[in-house]
Image (cartoon, rainbow, N blue to C red):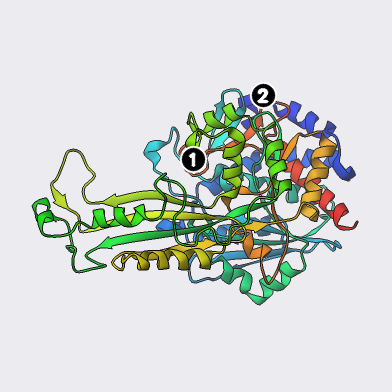
């Protein structure tokens, strides 16, 4: 069924079997055959997973999402999998003992972002297979690339190795949460469970499956990620008696304060007059500047990430202050941010309604860089507002964590470099991802483990309409689902070898 859409099935199988072999993956052709044989079943499993969204912000798909994640682990060869309760959405903890000398940790997220079906070209929970011009066949659906597609490819790799009659080259400890998209509100509770922490402590590090391949076939290695804190600022009748409890006639603005204006005034203090530089008191106190090595890595990454391509993908024509591309990249990877995600107050329908709102709310997020912390950012925000008399502005923190970073000589990073070098795949190394994932939970105390991302697959549209993940690639340099699966197979063998050096 899937093969007929692109006519690439046999060609993909031959390409997989004939690919350069990283770390001499044993019985690679046989494992490739298992991947090919289960191709359609893997797509169906991904479609079924997309059809079951877990959305923490809407309290949707819980605890069903955790139960489904647990079963996915068991079906992939994990000997034990259990649900870990939290004060919010439950997590899943699973272990696979292959009797290997090396153990690695894997982080999954089984939750997805919210979606509006009206904004999509196909139903967001259908997982429809669509020809993507110039790229091949892709699966479209919420969670397709973030992160169910890459995660399903990883699980398929585990199945293929075992189906070929071999044991995995490494033992695996899996932790999967259902609140990543609300800034991992309770994930620290999961890792604090003694059984989970003890298992993770035996690993050489933790990685999250990802889709890090560009349209030209090049790849990216990231040495960390920014932290994130999500919060809301609310002003209205619920925060002070000087505002109405509900919307009232706008003529009353002559004698009653408007909470929307008050919120705007508070928000305006958080950034400088340029509209983007954070102005919270003491904000840059612990910001660690880029090292010369990090600047060099960013400059080298320009070769594989052309400016025109970046601008086109973002739909913009210029960077902040008309900065040069390299300067914008240094800002992208090094600068903490204060971003307004959305503003809501009063009437927003067609025409006017002449009301004075009873409530105004802004949804914001911080992006944090080394050596900032979540607690520091939150305390400085509250102190900043209090100092300016905004005691009527309510601050609600919905989740967050600090940044993470891993050294270039960590086993997980060395293995990526070796894999790419042996396969002749061009790659750049980034000091960190400007996006966020809770790697600091592993990277920081008490575990202090390397934490990274890895995945040789392609997709796009995360958090946006028409999210997609490439299934059948029309470019031999770019991986489809089967090739991405085999990249995980090869990676596990390379990690096993590098860990024994």
- Spot occupied by residue 402 in the image (x, y as percentages of width and height): 58, 61
Q: Callout 2: helix, strand or loop?
A: loop
Measured Cα–Cα span from mark 2 to mark 1: 22 Å
Q: Which mark is residue 198?
A: none
Using the rendered image of the protein, determine whether residue 46 is visible from the camera's viewpoint: no
**On residue 126, which mark appears?**
1
Across and down, in percent, residue 343 comes to 33, 50
In the picture, residue 234 is in which quadrant? bottom left
Taking the image as drawn, is residue 378 in sight? yes
Residue 289 to residue 194: above or below: above
Q: Position of residue 447 (x, y in %)?
A: 70, 69
Q: Residue at x 67, y 24 (%)?
A: 7
Q: How many marks?
A: 2
Residue drawn at (19%, 69%), measured in percent from left and top?
A: 241
Left or right of 254 in this view: 373: right
Q: Nearer the viewer, residue 241 or 245?
A: 241
* Residue indicated by mark 2: 7
């Amino acid at each position: 069924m899937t093969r007929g859409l692109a006519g690439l099935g046999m060609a993909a199988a031959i390409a997989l079997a004939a690919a350069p072999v990283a770390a001499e993956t044993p019985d690679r052709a046989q494992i490739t055959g298992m991947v090919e044989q289960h191709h359609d079943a893997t797509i169906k499993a991904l479609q079924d997973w997309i059809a079951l969204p877990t959305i923490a912000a809407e309290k949707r798909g819980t605890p069903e999402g955790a139960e489904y994640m647990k079963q996915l682990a068991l079906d992939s060869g994990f000997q034990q999998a259990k649900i870990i309760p939290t004060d919010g959405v439950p997590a899943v903890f699973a272990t696979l003992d292959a009797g290997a000398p090396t153990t690695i940790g894997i982080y999954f997220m089984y939750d997805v972002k919210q979606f509006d079906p009206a904004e999509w070209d196909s139903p967001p929970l259908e997982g429809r297979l669509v020809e993507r011009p110039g790229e091949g066949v892709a699966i479209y659906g919420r969670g397709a690339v973030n992160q169910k597609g890459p995660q399903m490819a990883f699980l398929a790799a585990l199945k293929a190795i075992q189906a070929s009659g071999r044991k995995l080259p490494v033992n695996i400890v899996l932790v999967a949460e259902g609140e990543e998209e609300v800034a991992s509100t309770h994930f620290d509770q999961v890792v604090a469970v003694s059984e989970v922490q003890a298992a993770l402590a035996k690993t050489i590090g933790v990685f999250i499956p990802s889709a890090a391949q560009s349209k030209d076939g090049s790849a990216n290695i990231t040495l960390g990620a920014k932290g994130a804190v999500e919060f809301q600022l609310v002003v209205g009748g619920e925060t002070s008696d000087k505002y109405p409890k509900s919307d009232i006639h706008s003529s009353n603005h002559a004698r009653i304060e408007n909470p929307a204006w008050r919120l705007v005034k508070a928000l305006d203090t958080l950034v400088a007059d340029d509209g983007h530089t954070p102005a919270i008191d003491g904000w840059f106190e612990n910001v660690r500047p880029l090292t010369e090595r990090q600047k060099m890595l960013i400059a080298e990454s320009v070769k594989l990430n052309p400016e025109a391509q970046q601008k086109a993908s973002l739909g913009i024509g210029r960077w902040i202050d008309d900065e040069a591309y390299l300067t914008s990249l240094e800002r992208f990877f090094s600068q903490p941010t204060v971003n307004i995600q959305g503003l809501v107050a009063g009437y927003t329908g067609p025409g006017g309604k002449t009301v004075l709102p009873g409530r105004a709310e802004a949804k914001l997020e911080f992006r944090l860089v080394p050596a900032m912390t979540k607690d520091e950012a939150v305390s400085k925000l509250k102190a900043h507002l209090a100092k300016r008399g905004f005691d009527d502005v309510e601050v609600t923190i919905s989740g967050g964590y600090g940044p993470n970073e891993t050294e270039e000589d960590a086993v997980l990073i060395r293995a990526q470099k070796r894999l790419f070098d042996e396969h002749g795949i061009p790659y750049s190394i980034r000091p960190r991802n400007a996006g966020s994932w809770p790697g600091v939970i592993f990277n920081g105390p008490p575990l202090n483990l390397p934490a990274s991302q890895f995945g040789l697959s392609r997709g796009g549209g995360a958090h946006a309409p028409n999210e997609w993940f490439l299934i059948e690639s029309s470019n031999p340099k770019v991986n489809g689902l089967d090739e991405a699966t085999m990249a995980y197979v090869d990676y596990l063998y390379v990690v096993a070898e590098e860990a024994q050096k």
